[in-house]
Amino acid sequence: MKTAIRFEILGEPFGKKNMQPIMVGGHARAFSPQKNEEYMSKVYFSLKEALKDVEQEGIIFDKDTPVKVNILALYEIPKSHYKFYKSLGKCDYDKVGKSMLVGEIRPTKKPDLDNISKVICDGITKVGRVWFDDSQVVEETLQKYYAETPKVIVEVIGLKEE
């Protein structure tokens, strides 16, 4: 049986921002934007909550265990879509909303999927209970959809049989 961890991060999906340069004493330094740290904290606490019921002590996936990560980023249906389609008079805006909820219309907006993955994997590594390092991720599924409640659903699956 393969081990799997599943958790949800409530709120709009967030993508990791690039390091920001600053000058300190005439030298350039880079720092991580505060929003990265805030979102990693959300990942940290969401994962910690999910791990409360895990009886296993220590790290769940040891250094030699390859893992797969599934990330489902769910965006709130933008109010502007309703207003836009209603103003055209060409389209039933309720139908557009339903098309978004069933996946016929999908979000093509920021953040990029790879940046969502980076901040989540870094947050998981920070917890220190799931894996030693996110270099253990050998497979990843990333998807964007619309939903009534914005959130990110994350599943980490060990690819070694237990």
Image: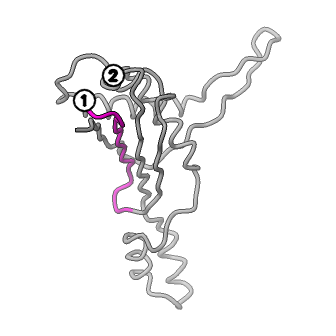
x and y, in percent, of residue 147 in the image: 37, 62
- Do the residues under discs 1 and 2 have CB atoms within 8 angstroms? yes
Q: Going by the picture, which residue comes out furthest to the bottom?
A: 90
152 and 88: which one is in front?
A: 152
Q: Going by the picture, which residue comes out furthest to the top?
A: 25
Split into 4 quadrants, where in the image is the N terminus?
top left
Relative placement, left or right, of 16 versus 10 is: right
Kindly indicate the quadrant of the structure image that contains residue 64: top left
Magenta stretch?
Answer: 147-162
Q: Which residue is mark 2?
A: 129
Relative placement, left or right, of 82 versus 22 is: left
Task: Give yes or no for residue 134 being in the magenta stretch.
Answer: no
Q: Does 65 sit above or below residue 84?
A: above
Look at 38% across and 23% down and name the residue there.
127
13 and 83: which one is in front?
A: 13
x and y, in percent, of residue 30 in the image: 69, 21
Look at 38% across and 54% down and name the residue there.
150
Instruction: Give the class, few, some or many, for how many residues have Cα within 10 Å of label 1's Cα (few <14, many ≥20).
Output: some
Give the structural element (helix, strand or loop) at label 2: loop
Kindly indicate the quadrant of the structure image that contains residue 162: top left
Task: Give yes or no for residue 157 being in the magenta stretch.
Answer: yes
108 and 33: which one is in front?
A: 108
What scheme was used to colour the molecule?
A: one colour
Three-letter amino acid code at the position of disc 2 = Arg
Q: Which residue is mark 1?
A: 51
x and y, in percent, of residue 128 in the image: 38, 20
Three-letter amino acid code at the position of disc 1 = Leu
Marks 1 and 2 sit apart, C-alpha to C-alpha, by 9 Å
Give the structural element (helix, strand or loop) at label 1: helix
Look at 47% across and 68% down and name the residue there.
79
Look at 34% across and 62% down and name the residue there.
148
Q: Does 65 sit above or below residue 5?
A: above
